[in-house]
């Protein structure tokens, strides 16, 4: 018996392994290949020799919780109760899994908007829930008529991801207003807002659920220090939720991981005193511009990248192959790895799109673009 009978090796592992085998430039997996901030390294080296190697409290290091609360107030104007509304997690993925398994009961339905991050559905299935996959519009905006038609008395949760992986789409004010209207109509439905790319936006500002009181009161919001500080291997994230929801989440968390890596929490806590998140957005804006300009004369059509560190392209001028097959050809014949977008859909919708990650050194991006232009 398997709780995940249809789950196989993730596309991210498949493409990275293929890229390594063929010595391709890996723009598939969403992790940076450049060094972390020197100041973060200095803090790490200094703190490693101090007494920070034992368990932290289950909910997280107190100083880190206080600083997250301060950032939430400064960035979003939301006051948090540190003792009851915050939880440090082993990365955002564990936070999402924990939240879903705390909230979703056997037979509950969870609406997932496709294309969607691949951890959502397995988390629902393990909880005994039923994923209800709803496609976004062609421009990756939400279709609220379609979403509402999927809501039933069994619907427990809607998951949104903003800024959006894999497309880089950012929700507009009007879309949040529509979501508020919808959830007022169905008060039994909760919200899980995945905001791990919250500090990486380009065209218009990221709107957080933290800034929407009508939503925040029924929402679980997840963030990622791995994404925000480009230390993905440290696996430190956080959840913010109203006390009544957080109490249930903590029950699952304490028997899943209990407490998160103490060293990373201490280092991040101190680093938050000096980091400027606007500089992170500026850095990624430079890389986005560099990559887009380098591909300007290619046969790829570049879709808008409003946030995250991903660039989606259409390759219909190059090939009519299915996106998984074309992505493999791109590695074996042209030496560049990307992720096919169809894997983010339940029904494997294939619009001949690929996702490139531009969280790479300038040299890596230019070398990849040179190969892509030659196709």
Image (cartoon, rainbow, N blue to C red):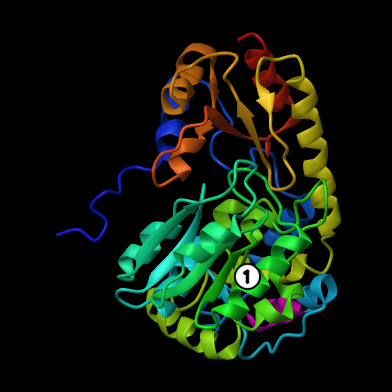
Expressed as whole percent of the image width and height from the top left, the position of residue 373 reads 67, 13
Is residue 277 found inside the magenta-colored segment of the image? no
**Is 2 left or right of 106, judged from the image as shown?**
left
Asked whether the viewer can see residue 252, the reply is: yes
> Residue at horizontal 61%, vertical 86%?
242
**Is 47 left or right of 262, judged from the image as shown?**
right
210 and 235: which one is in front? 210
Q: Residues within 10 Å of mark 1 (few under 14, many from 20)?
A: many
Question: In this picture, is 325 found above or below 57?
Answer: above
Write down the quadrant of residue 297 in the picture.
top right
Q: Which residue is mark 1?
A: 265
> Residue at horizontal 76%, vertical 21%?
294
Question: In this picture, is 176 found above or below 38?
Answer: below
Expressed as whole percent of the image width and height from the top left, the position of residue 28 reads 54, 34
Is residue 68 found inside the magenta-colored segment of the image? yes
For the magenta stretch, what is the residue range? 61-69
> Residue at horizontal 71%, vertical 59%?
198
Q: Quadrant of the C terminus?
A: top right
Expressed as whole percent of the image width and height from the top left, the position of residue 92 reads 55, 63
């Amino acid at each position: 018996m398997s709780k995940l009978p249809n789950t196989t090796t993730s596309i991210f592992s498949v493409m990275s392994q293929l890229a390594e085998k063929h010595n391709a430039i890996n723009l598939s997996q969403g992790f940076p290949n450049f060094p972390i901030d020197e100041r973060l390294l200095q803090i790490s080296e200094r703190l490693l020799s101090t007494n920070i190697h034992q368990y932290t409290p289950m909910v997280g290091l107190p100083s880190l919780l206080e600083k997250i609360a301060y950032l939430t107030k400064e960035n979003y104007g939301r006051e948090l109760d540190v003792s009851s509304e915050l939880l440090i997690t082993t990365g955002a993925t564990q936070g999402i899994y924990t939240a879903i398994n705390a909230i979703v009961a056997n037979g509950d339905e969870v609406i997932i908007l496709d294309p969607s991050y691949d951890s959502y559905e397995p988390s629902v299935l393990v909880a005994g829930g039923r994923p209800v996959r709803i496609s976004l519009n062609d421009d990756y905006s939400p279709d609220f008529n379609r979403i509402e038609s999927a809501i039933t008395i069994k619907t427990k949760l809607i998951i949104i991801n903003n800024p959006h992986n894999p497309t880089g789409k950012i929700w507009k004010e009007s879309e949040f207003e529509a979501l508020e209207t919808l959830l007022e109509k169905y008060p039994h439905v909760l919200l899980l807002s995945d905001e791990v790319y919250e500090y990486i936006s380009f065209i218009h500002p990221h709107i957080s659920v933290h800034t929407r009181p009508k939503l925040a009161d029924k929402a679980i919001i997840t963030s990622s220090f791995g994404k925000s500080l480009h230390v993905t291997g440290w696996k430190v994230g956080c959840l913010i939720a109203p006390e009544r929801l957080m109490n249930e989440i903590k029950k699952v968390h304490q028997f899943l991981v209990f407490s998160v890596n103490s060293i990373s929490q201490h280092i991040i806590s101190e680093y938050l005193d000096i980091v400027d998140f606007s500089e992170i957005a500026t850095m990624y804006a430079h890389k986005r511009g560099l990559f887009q300009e380098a591909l300007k004369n290619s046969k790829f059509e570049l879709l808008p990248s409003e946030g995250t560190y991903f660039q989606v392209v259409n390759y219909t001028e190059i090939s009519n192959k299915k996106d998984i097959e074309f992505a493999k050809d791109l590695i074996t014949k042209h030496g560049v790895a990307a992720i096919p977008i169809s894997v983010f859909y339940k029904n494997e919708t294939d619009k001949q799109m690929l996702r490139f990650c531009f969280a790479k050194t300038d040299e890596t991006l230019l070398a990849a673009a040179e190969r892509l232009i030659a196709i």
